[in-house]
Image: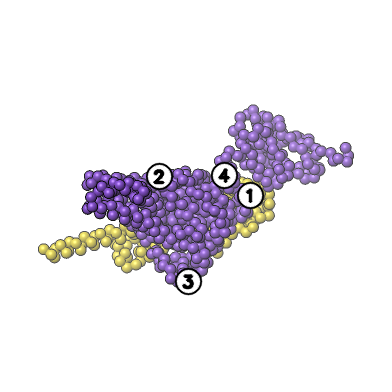
Amino acid sequence: MWEAIRRNRRRSVVLLASLAGTLLLAGGAMGALVGGSAGALAGGLAGVAYATLLAVLALRAGDRLLLAGLGAQPVRARDCPRLRNVVEEMAIAAGLPRVPAVYLLPLPQPNAFAVGPDPERAAIVVTSGLVKRLRRDELQAVVAHEVAHILNQDVRFLTLAAVAVASTTLFSDLFWRSFGLGGRVGRLRRVRPGPAWAWFALAALLALLAPLAARLLYLACSQDREYLADATAARLTRHPESLARALEKIAGVRTPARAVPRALAPLYIVNPLQVSFGNGGFATHPPLEARVRILRKMAGAAYADYERAYREVQPDGALPPGPWRSGPTVPVQAPAAEPQAEWVARVREVEGMLGARADWIVLRPCLCGLRVRIPRNLERESVRCPRCGRVQWLAAARPAAAGATTTAAARAALRYRRRSEGWEAFRCACGKALQLSPACEASRLRCPACHRRIAIEPAAAPAHTA
Amino acid sequence: MGMEWFVLALSAALVVWVVVQYNALVRLRNQVRNAWSQIHVQLKRRHDLIPNLVETVRAYAAHERETLDQVIRARGRAVEARSVGEQAQAEGELSRALGRLMLVVEQYPQLRANENFLALQEELTSTENRIGFARQHYNDSVMSFNTRVQSFPAHLIASAFEFREAEFFELEEVADREVPQVVF
């Protein structure tokens, strides 16, 4: 682990230094073309200032800009306990200094990524499609993969790499527009052959090569990170199969990725859907099939097991340096069973969470099991369950409506019409489930929990006796 | 002139090496301590969860008194346990009692449809997982700390500054992995 972190730190420093150097040279060269040695100085300073500004901005506010730009919503504990719990569990397993913030991205394509400048200020973003589709252990494996990126401090490096790509590209554009073939070539003609031509050659070379080099570096670095993050995820969850299944599910949904908002264009290469957990075909990630095969081949959950499986699947591939040889054997353990394994329950949970933001309220589940969602400002005392027709009173769902007066109104309005002669159950407005026996002939009763009076009306007379 | 400088440089390098080794050991030891306190946080969380759970189950399954009482008694012992061994045993027992309670709950569909109970069950599952993961992290930390303390050059520093090997935290294996497996 420490090798990986140190390597990331070293790479970050090297990257920043070379970025500053490149921009210094580039700025200097461009400045020299325009205004001689004074111009070179000014240009160089401007280049360095620009690089510093970008890096500071990316590390200070890059994550927030990204999250806001994508429309990710923060997830609170009560919105989706399963998701919050899974993240907290993995943070504990990894020994992170703080539980990462969790964001939900309303997007049907299952995916996840991690952002943040350091482990203390990291955030994990999951799409609603992911939460809906994955079982608890699979979700846990995906979250473990993202936690691994945070733990290995990949995220900071990727942010910096993105800055490098963006800024060198910008420089290149600037250069070609000013001095390129379509630009002010005429000005160059007036420059006497000599040092100026050398400056021009240098700037042109940098303009050509720097963006390319930055992009290549970014691609090369992001590939091997995925293997390490997979290995760490397997070790944290002690169950490689979960991650393999999750990857398969993610790969199975090949809906086209939504275009990244243009507001994020400067950071364009940080395509949020590919940063750390994209599906197979993208160049930033190793082929998904290989990753799944490696995970399936693991005999245990230790790094050494991952390394062995990797050698089997990709005999001529090379893993990045990492903790491959260290650590004891770690047996695979079955994950804990999920309390609610139902796909329907998961969909409701996520939709409810998204709906909560749109100012809907979800009623207590009806006795037939259906959860009814109503707009918060619906001006009615009760609704009927669309599945079983039971009445549901809204008094309890909107406690803060208008205080005592509405409660009095609600009390007066509790009126239950029986639907049959047999056993029947319904909820009082306070939520207490009440049962009526076939023998019950009372025309009113009192809720034992809240003491509301409820009028019981007999079932409508069957047609043939009328 | 040459000799003094050489000795000076050598001793400076030695001091730096000792400082680096010492700091690495301190870092690992702190990691172990943090991990240990995390286990306690999670055990506390479980203890706090149980009264609520028992009350909810009691509302629907009042005549399962014995199972409920067992859970409460096991919780009481776990809260009072002081030594590490005592604690491991009490927690194992609590896990078993909770496992039995969850099996009993299977017979009460109304209870299982209860919103409050479902939320509690999610919390309980998560707490069991957290305890497991906290223990896993603790044992991993202990492993790397002990390896460091035992291996050769660091061993000298460790014994000079009295870094003692840390103890692993093992619940009874069978009970431990059995419990969270609530089968539906």
Q: Which residue is mark 1?
A: B57
Precedes in sequence: disc 4 or disc 3: 3
Mark 4: which amino acid? Leu
- Dot 1 lies on which element? helix
CB under 8 Å between callouts 1 and 3? no
Q: Do the residues indicated by labels 3 and 2 lie within the same chain of the protein?
A: yes
Q: How far, Cα to Cα, is label 1 from label 4?
A: 31 Å
Q: Nearer the viewer, residue A186 or B120?
A: A186
Q: Colour of chain A?
A: purple
On what subunit does the disc labeled 4 rest?
A
Q: Position of residue B166 (x, y in %)?
A: 40, 61
Mark 3: which amino acid? Glu
Which residue is at the far left? B1
Q: Is residue B12 left or right of residue B53?
A: left
- Dot 3 lies on which element? helix
Compared with A75, B148 (above or below) is: below
Precedes in sequence: disc 3 or disc 2: 2
Q: Which residue is mark 4?
A: A354
CB under 8 Å between callouts 3 and 2? no
Mark 1 or mark 3: which is in front? 3
Q: Which residue is mark 2?
A: A61
Q: Colour of chain B?
A: yellow
Circle 2 residues within 10 Å: few <14, some 14–19, many ≥20: some
Q: Which mark is residue A312?
A: 3
Mark 2: which amino acid? Ala
Q: How far, Cα to Cα, is label 3 from label 2?
A: 42 Å
Question: Toward which corner of the image does residue A381 lie, by quadrant?
Answer: top right
